[in-house]
Image (spheres, rainbow, N blue to C red):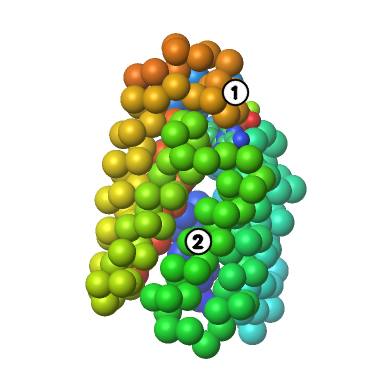
Amino acid sequence: MNTAMLTLIDAAKEKILAQKEWLTSLDAAIGDGDHGINMARGFEAVATKVRTLPPEAELPAILKTVGMTLISTVGGASGPLYGTAFLRAADQASKSAGLPAAALLGNILAGALQGIKDRGKATTGEKTMVDALEPACVAYDRGLTEGKTLPVCLEMACEAARQGVEYTKTIIATKGRASYLGERSLGHQDPGATSLCLLLETLSDFVN
Ligand code: ADP
Ligand code: MG
Ligand code: MG
């Protein structure tokens, strides 16, 4: 497949592998301590799987492969959630073919967010990856409306995602394993919001 996409996917894998222990320790504090392990397993499988795609594979097919690989290799909540995000991103990529890149990426991010919300029956304020991705999508769209370039829109999205991760420290989890802790989840950042932010930052570094 396309070498630029391969470079991006490898960068995402490397980022997750580099932060594997950290993600796992964040999950150990409020969950079952496997988020880094889950994400590393998933992205290692993704990096292998996309290499089997034909050279002419286009964005929707690549995103779909990423999603299906995450669903089939990641045990735990984050597999189906990220997997659905990439499958919905793939749908948006095919519907948005022909749009300028900045608008295309906005639709892809919105599709990913809707996928996570649907799959997880989640909304903002529940201490999940939605608390990073939803503000990121809002910021990205604000950038688009202001006529900013794709890299600038993505920087705005990353900044909003980082603030979203900080926000997760201030709220009680009401979805996922962390919800079993109730008030004891306060003060800890959500691992899924954190990995979401890392992935967005990888994309931003790639285009900047
Ligand atoms: P598990 O909780 O099954 O061990 P992971 O540790 O890999 O799975 O992923 C946990 C992350 O998944 C959480 O930090 C949270 O961001 C996200 N998550 C869990 N449940 C939901 C949900 N219903 N909706 C959205 N995100 C969720
Ligand atoms: Mg876990
Ligand atoms: Mg688990």
Left or right of 202 in this view: 115: right
Q: Where is mark 1, residue-wise?
A: 177
Amino acid bearing label 2: Ala
Q: Give the Cα separation between the discs numbered 1 and 2.
A: 25 Å
Residue at the spot 44% in from the left edge and 49% down from the top edge: 133
Sequence-first disc among 1 and 2: 2
Q: Residue lying furthest right in this view?
A: 72
Amino acid bearing label 1: Arg
Residue 146 drawn at (x, y percent): 25, 72
Quadrant in the rendering for residue 97: bottom right
Task: Give whichever of 103, 27 is nearer the camera.
Answer: 103
Instruction: Give the answer, above or below, for where 65 lies relative to 115.
Output: below
- Element assignment for label 1: helix
Residue 138: which numbered mark, if any? none
Residue at the spot 57% in from the left edge and 39% down from the top edge: 122
Residue at the spot 32% in from the left edge and 58% down from the top edge: 139
Instruction: Give the answer, above or below, for where 30 lies relative to 120.
Output: above
Left or right of 76 in this view: 140: left
Q: Where is mark 2, residue-wise?
A: 110
Left or right of 185 in this view: 93: right
Instruction: Give the answer, above or below, for where 142 lies relative to 75.
Output: below
Q: Quadrant of ligand 3?
A: top right
- Element assignment for label 2: helix
- The response on whether ligand 1 sits within 8 Å of label 1 is yes
Residue 181 drawn at (x, y percent): 52, 13
Asked if residue 62 can be seen in this view, the reply is no
| Quarter placement of the C terminus | bottom left
